[in-house]
Image (cartoon, rainbow, N blue to C red):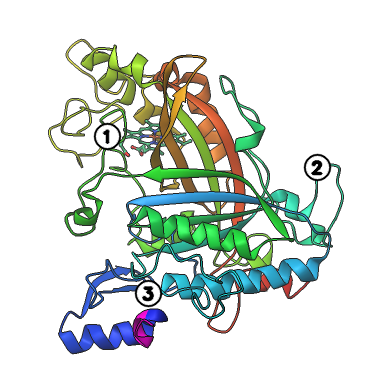
Amino acid sequence: VPEESTRRGISRGELFKIAGATGAGIVLGGVGTRAVASTARGDAGSVPFFGIHQAGIDTPLQQNMLFAAFDLTTDDVSKVRKLLREWTAAAVLMCEGREVGETDVNAYLPPEDTGEALGMGSSRLTLTFGFGSTLFEQEGGEDRFGLRASKPEALVDIPPMPGEEMEPERSGGDLCVQACAEDKQVAFHAIRNLTRISRGIATIRWSQVGFGPRYQKRLLLTKETPRNLFGFKDGTNNLNIEDEEKMARHVWVDSADDQAWMGGGTYVVARRIRMLVEVWDRSSLRDQEQSIGRVKISGAPIGSENEFDPVDLAAKGDDGRPLAPPDSHVRLSQEGGEKILRRGYSFTDGVDLTRGQLEAGLFFVCFQRDPQKQFVPLQRRLAQNDALNEYILHTGSAVFACPPGAREGGYVGETLFDRA
Ligand code: HEM
């Protein structure tokens, strides 16, 4: 029989005690109010589940992601509320690196926790929950749960855009859970156990695995920008998660915006974007840089030396042409002034047999206060003119309202469901 402390894992309170006692202290301020505790087990630390905002949004990027969308199979709102309570309880435990229930109590029953994350710690796991438009109103207009009056105006699916090949089986969903962790197996364990708990109430609709470069842990300290699968630094001009004023302006919903229950929440847009790497790899370095509008190795704007030099859209080269070409990704992304918090991951899903190509790309995830005012106009400009369109293909799309963070003793979605 394993020792009690390893069997039930170590609580967050204990972690802080250990961290204090060993002098390891709290290694990172994280962002805002969210601290990251270093553990005595050589773990990557844990990110608190409770807070004003859900974790996994203003949390420094972990290395791995598993995103899952669920469909509800019940018409009973009290069952949905019960599921969210149970998901919250399980999420709290898993984010502390603990198992969801006993693993070795009754030899005649399936163990409660599935076991594959035993002894791995929290691995900076975050679980972020969201509600799709179909939770409030089904496609035929049906008000299954009596939630229609609470549907935020901002929660509308992204309209079709030119050039995309959407697959319904990779789009939409009543609920979503984004699991991010340093370790892939910890993220998998979390989604698997939440799926197990949802049995009889919800079924999994689609999921997407995402990864980032291994040096991401170092990035937390050095703030070096990771590269995407086109080999370009991606995130240079992203919103700064430490800039609370900008986060409040562009990411967090104010309770006066629309539906009061969304105050402190945000909207996530997820797009599965294939990157046609074979086509990209046959294009010249010049074409690649002109398409993005930045220098590949340094990440600097064309004509500048350093990655973080500002992009000057008015700057012209010796030939009188703009340094950031009219159809470059950077110019088009910046032109309308919309700001979003990008938090995407690379993916590879085997081979596209019809094209005989790698099925790889970017699982683009972004957070914003109102997708209708931010993502939609931005993506409309890109879909029409972006030079990158020759090399990419959007194949999945979903929008979810992420409610505010849960308070200790409460549950995710409480501000919505306690009114229903
Ligand atoms: C596979 C698809 C995509 C790739 C490879 C890609 C790549 C990049 C790269 C390399 C940069 C420059 C570095 C940076 O500032 O982060 C960038 C910037 C940016 N991208 Fe994308 N991107 C993709 C899709 C999108 C989509 C779908 C959107 C939104 C609809 C978007 C919005 C932005 C924005 C807002 C910026 C910052 C522009 C600025 O203010 O300078 N990107 N992207």
Callout 1 secondary element: loop
The Cα atoms of the two marked residues, 2 and 1, are separated by: 43 Å
- Residue 251 on image: x %, y %: 48, 56
Upstream in sequence: badge 2 or badge 3:
3
**Mark 3 and mark 1: Cα distance apart in space:** 31 Å
Ligand 1 quarter of the rendering:
top left
Give the residue number, with chain letter if any, for mark 3. Answer: 33
Q: Residue furthest front?
A: 108
Q: Residues within 10 Å of mark 2 (few under 14, many from 20)?
A: few
Q: Tell me residue 84's x, y (percent).
A: 65, 69
- Classify mark 2 as within 8 Å of ligand 1 or not, answering yes or no: no
Give the residue number, with chain letter if any, for mark 2. 139
Task: Give me the residue at 32% from left, 25% from top.
Answer: 292
Looking at the rendering, in which quadrant would you find the C terminus?
A: bottom right
Magenta extent = 1-6
On the question of residue 338 being in view, the answer is no
Which comes sooner in the sequence, label 3 or label 1? Answer: 3
Q: Position of residue 39 (x, y in %)?
A: 26, 76
**Circle 2/circle 1 CB separation < 8 Å:** no
Magenta-drawn stretch contains 4 = yes
Check whether the beta carbons of the residues at disc 2 and disc 3 lie within 8 A of each other. Answer: no
| Residue drawn at point x = 49 percent, y = 77 percent | 104
What residue is at 34 percent from the left and 70 percent from the top? 121
Confirm whether the magenta stretch covers residue 183.
no
* Residue annotated with mark 1: 311
Judge depth for marks 2 and 3 and give the one in front: 2
Which of these two is toward me, 170 or 102?
Answer: 102
In the rendered structure, the answer to whether residue 344 lies left or right of residue 216 reads: right
